Amino acid sequence: MVPGVVFAQQKKKASEEDFVKEKPAVGDPFPDLVVYDPKGQEVKTSSLRGHYTVLTFGCLT
Amino acid sequence: MFFIYKSLAHPELAGNYVQPFTLDERLAHARQAEKQLGATVPWLVDAMDNRLKHALGDRANSEFIVDPKGIIVRKRAWSHPAEVRTDLEKLVGPVENITREEDVKLKLELPIKSAAARGVVPRLKRSEQMQAIVIVPKIDPKGPSFFAKLRAETDPDLFRDGAGKLYLGFHLDPLHEAHWNNLTKPLSFKLEVPEGVKIGKLSFESPPVMAPSDSDPREFLVDVENWPEGKSIRLSVIYYACVGKETCHTVKQEYEIHLERDRDAGKARGEGAGFWDAEGFARQNLARDKNGDGKLNKAEVQGLIVPHFESFDKNQDGLLDFEELKPVSDWLNHHHQPGTALSTPK
């Protein structure tokens, strides 16, 4: 095993497990907030109800 | 499905983008991201108070599936297309025709090109340990755009001991397509500090640049002592920015700088702020090794590596080991250079 990997794995796993357990967790309502579409129109997250919705945070930078 | 556009995870990377100051600027970022990625997936843009990011746990990468009643039914710390597919098959049912990566035909575009040459003014190399602190720009709706945007970072000593380095960098915002006008006075700024704060000097001026224009940041490192929490430093800056060949602006702007970590400012990456190093990158990624074999299979890798997995798998064993992961950092660093295409790694 490469030195440092075990520690990094444990730290990462703990951080990711904590995140999944934190509120809002599975079974909680998705937060009801106002955000925007790219043209600046307000979008209520509650308006996404009625379908299964996948929301993904990522980074292009 | 929606992509969420939030504050930048790695400002200065992938096109030298910087954190926006206004919602209009963030919306312009989102439209640029839409254009660069070329995906048909719609975007939602977080508000400037970062309410969605905060409400959902502040991670750079994460993924949620919400059922028709608005209840979270899946939550993971990293987005993972293969797992989303499996989840949706369980929740909604299998589909007849599976959309493959190659079916999507992403129309990837390059980041916005800098308005003038970069690499003219040497970058100030700052420590990897530096953390962004809160800055509050004084926004005048009738005033000029923030063509250049301040980023402030401190080393951990400043939080711990009240004495340390303060990084102040003025980065041109690519969205405003401006460049420095070096034929006139260079950027200068003044600081007003709370009583008792010790600072080397209060007035600063960027050294003159021989080239008539450029797009490199103007960066300063300042020694600060006895900066109490809750007291802000005021900064007033003046600079000359040009858009195109004809339109030049004299810009005076002000900021408050707070000794408070800004958890929405991201970790700057790139020249000056530090690229990924090969061994550290490989080590960090091997932390995703779920089955403990010391290597990553395709299901264990994430992000930009996924579509290029086979190219990095030199011995074609279906696994990426430490030595195979090291070159990925070079490729990512290169890939993130402005003006380089999203090409398949060699």
Image (cartoon, rainbow, N blue to C red):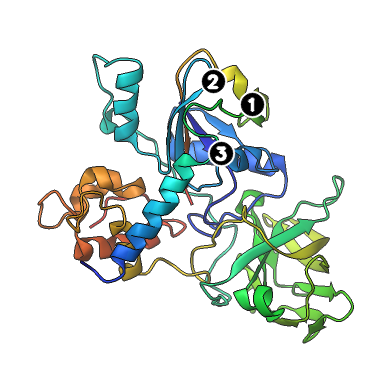
- The residue closer to the viewer here, A22 or B133, is A22
Residue drawn at (28%, 45%) of the image: B306
Please indicate, yes or no, whether residue A58 appears anywhere in the rendered image.
Answer: no
Q: On the image, which quarter does residue B181 sit in?
A: bottom right
Q: Residues within 10 Å of mark 3 (few under 14, many from 20)?
A: many
Q: Quadrant of residue B200?
A: bottom right
Q: Give the amino acid type for the residue marked by disc 1 in the picture.
A: Asp
Q: Pick the residue in front: B285 or A41.
A: B285
Residue at 40% of width from left, 39% of height from top? Answer: B79
Count residues near mark 2 (Cα–Cα under 10 Å), then give few for <14, some for 14-19, many for 20+. many
Q: Position of residue A60 (x, y in %)?
A: 47, 47
Farthest residue toward the right? B195
CB contact under 8 Å: marks 2 and 3:
no
SS of the residue at dot 3?
A: loop
Q: Secondary structure at mark 2?
A: loop
Q: CA distance from mark 1 to mark 3?
A: 11 Å
Same chain for the residues under marks 2 and 3 in the image: yes
Do callouts 1 and 2 mark residues in contact (Cβ within 8 Å)?
yes
Residue of label 3: B56
* Residue carrying label 2: B70
Chain letter of the residue beneath label 2 in the structure image: B
Q: Which residue is mark 1?
A: A32
Subunit of mark 3? B
N-terminal of the two: label 2 or label 3? 3
* Host chain of mark 1: A
Task: Tell me which amino acid carries mark 2.
Answer: Gly
In the shown orientation, is residue B212 left or right of residue B90? right
